[in-house]
Amino acid sequence: MNDFRINHIRNKGEIVSLYDLLLKFMARIYMSTNGKYPALEWLKPKEKPDPKKKNFLKDFKNKYGPFLRWRLTEELDEIYLAFDKDRLIGVIALNHKLEGKKIPWVPKEYMKRNDVGFIELFAVDPEYRGQGIGRLLFLKALKRLEELGKRPCVVTFTNLEAVAFYEKMGGKKEKEYGEYILYCF
């Protein structure tokens, strides 16, 4: 593994300021996964941005941008960013202050619990996959939630390659509902 840098950000203002950087990064992830992640599940298939079109970035920003802004301002409590020099190559976020939040993909009964925290917004640049970046970010997220006295959980889609990763990392499937799977560690 190269000499990568990990930044851990807990300040809400700093998290919100990451919007442009994360929007471009998530657009790269969306293109590399052929639109599987981020899933943009609230859109109909014909409305989803087409990575092959000339105006893709503008279309992606219009459709994913408001959701990303909501995540940064209302949902996420901490975020880890992996960099190779100045290039963002990985991200993972934590959601552990659940009281009063409304997160539609998290089962309601888990939103009422004080003993769990959620790993969110997990992605690694396709050019850096297989180099241990995802594992490193994930281990940091697990450790941080454990430090906070929270049982780490993650909600994913049934059709993502992340399912195998979560199982490899020791995740146990707790619940399958609709297109989602809840794993806890």
Image (spheres, grey):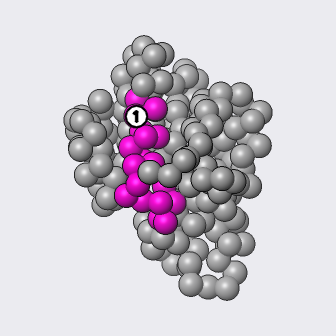
SS at badge 1: helix
How crowded is the residue under tag 1: few (<14 C-alpha within 10 Å), some, or many (20+)?
few
Q: Is residue 174 above or below residue 17?
A: above
- Kind of residue at disc 1: Leu
Q: Position of residue 131 (x, y in %)?
A: 41, 54
Q: Is residue 119 above or below residue 111?
A: below
Question: Does residue 108 appear to the left or right of 166 in the view shown?
Answer: right
Q: Position of residue 81 (x, y in %)?
A: 59, 43
> In the rendered structure, does residue 155 fall within the stretch colored magenta?
no
Question: Does residue 70 appear to the left or right of 159 in the view shown?
Answer: right
Residue 182, located in which quarter of the rendered image? top left
| Residue denoted by label 1 | 139
Which residues lie in the magenta part? Answer: 124-142
Question: Does residue 54 appear to the left or right of 138 in the view shown?
Answer: right
Q: Is residue 52 above or below residue 98?
A: below
The C terminus lies in which quarter of the figure? top left
Residue found at x 68% / y 72%: 57
Residue found at x 77% / y 33%: 13
Q: Position of residue 129 (x, y in %)?
A: 42, 59
Residue found at x 47% / y 24%: 144
Residue found at x 45% / y 36%: 119
